[in-house]
Amino acid sequence: MKITIPGYKIEHLIAEGGTASVYLAVQESLQRHVAIKLLRKFDNPEQLTRFLNEGRIIASLNHRNVINIHDVGVTDNGRPYISMEYLEGGDLDARIPKKVDPEDALQWLEVLGNCLDFVHRKGIIHRDIKPGNILFHKDGTPILTDFGTAKQQESDAGLTLDGRTFGSPYYISPEQAASKKLDRRTDIYSLGIVLYEMLTGNKPYKGDSHIETIVAHMSDPLPVLPPELHRYRTLTNKMIAKSPDDRFTNAAEMVRFVQQLRKPVKKARRMTWAPAGALATIIGIGGVVLIVQSIIPERNEHPATPGTTTSEAVIPESPPVTVEMPSPEPGDPVKETPVAMSTNEQHIKELLSQAAAALEEYRLTKPTNNNAYHYYQQILELHPQHEEAIKGINRIADAYADLTESDLDRYDYQAARRHLHRGLTIHPANHRLQALQKKANIGQLLSQAATALKEDRLTRPKNNNAYYYYQRILELHPKHKQALKGITRIADAFGDLAESKLDKFNYVAAKQYVHQGLKIQPDNARLQELQKNTNAFRDAPGRLWKKIKSPFS
């Protein structure tokens, strides 16, 4: 369908959503590219109200990180449109698969946090923060867009969903999913999910359906960052806490936390002291005391300039004073002064010992505060890149992989999924667990299909029958032998039902069963043969004669 908007030349489609499409166009009066958001359909007045509401809200905002709106109008055929600035940098969705650098992620988070703070202070809640709604200028500046589901607090004090769920299920807050009262902290939650995805490349909550994903936001435990991203754990936990009361109070508070996190860690200047003594070597010779102090700075520095204090000045390097010391007698061991261990190092050593013992006893994540994962997490809080702690967490994930494999060997799919969930919560990128997840899903589906077959739930009820489960397995593994055999068993079951009806001369019911079986397995030879027998005129006389003869056979 050709789209005509006076003053604009439509070039091509950029994106398409549930109710609106976005086109690249040229605004002819200024010869500039713009993005035209066009309402594709409006089945009820609410859709039109929401669309126009977006234009009104964006027009009320004047912020460098909120998309600019140029015009609102109606096409020749009566469809409303919004003309906005065109951003050539694409959206965040396209950048996440390429792995976002954590420093870039924090920088964008700070910018977007400041933008949200401005929007919230205007009394507006976005309600649909997601990577697709974060665009970029050519220079890399992030821009917040798509205020179609936004609400103004004064115009909607309750901010409930009235039984409808807005926003993407992957980024929806628990209170939004439960249709509860919303405030600005719902946007902080969604932005926290975006941050997690930027850091890991994965969505933290992803079920087999939108409903499962939404339920996960409300009930599943907080996702755990991989060990190498441990320093961002407090930030993500504070943003995506289940209860709004446990999150940052507002976006400004979140920004202040991010700014502190982005500050570089200041390394203390190291100094090398002469080995003869800590500060000085004092030697008494004939009543003369010689004091030698040698300070060697780590790097060559300029001498102190006039006006600097002693503490600021750097003492230039001077040649060390050589002092002859008496040689030790042959056989006397040279005693070294023991280096005192810091409190942190001692604590880490104790925690490593406790973690090793917990691993040995398979106390992986339980009991609370007395398990291997707990001790390794404490170490990472003291030393975020501690190599042994990171390796320890990998060992815990591998231990859960071992348990999962054992469960699968025993066909205990419920235990397998439980161990998988715990392992992937700790280490989402563990390749063994990822591979086992597919196997566990297939195992559970096989178990469900077998139960459905026993209970004669061949193709009904919907989404809870043997055919449904075998089809799900074939989606995961197109040539899965057990699933293919299972579908043959279903077709044969329909053949059994058809034969039982033929024996009772119920050709209508027999024909229906054959038809159902052939829909599932069109090349089933037995059903094809039975299909010929469902013709009553051809089959009934012979079948009747067999019944008459059978007592005398």
Image (cartoon, helix red, strand yellow):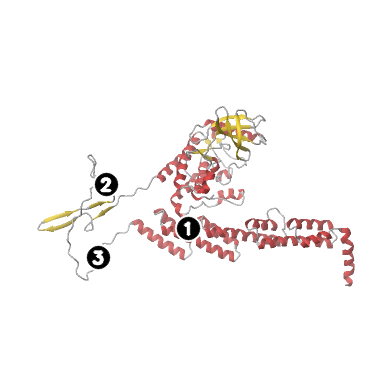
Disc 2 to disc 1, how far (Cα)?
52 Å
As shown in the figure, which amino acid type bears the numbered disc 1? Thr
The label shown at residue 67 is none
| Helix, strand or loop under label 1 | loop
Q: Residues within 10 Å of mark 2 (few under 14, many from 20)?
A: few
The label shown at residue 301 is 2
Question: Mark 3 or 2, which is nearer the eye?
Answer: 2
Closer to the camera, 361 or 297?
Answer: 297
Residue underneath mark 1: 368
Disc 3 to disc 1, how far (Cα)?
45 Å
Q: Residues within 10 Å of mark 3 (few under 14, many from 20)?
A: few
Q: Earlier in the sequence, mark 3 or mark 2?
A: 2
Position in image of residue 287 (x %, y %): 10, 57
Q: Left of 1 or right of it: where is 205?
A: left
| Helix, strand or loop under label 2 | loop
As shown in the figure, which amino acid type bears the numbered disc 2? Glu
Q: Earlier in the sequence, mark 3 or mark 1?
A: 3
Quarter of the figure that contains the N terminus: top right
Q: Left of 451 or right of it: where is 180?
A: left
Please say if 134 is above or below 332.
above
Q: Residue at x 63, y 38 (%)?
A: 19
Position in image of residue 256 (x %, y %): 42, 41
Residue underneath mark 3: 335
Q: Residue at x 42, y 62 (%)?
A: 354
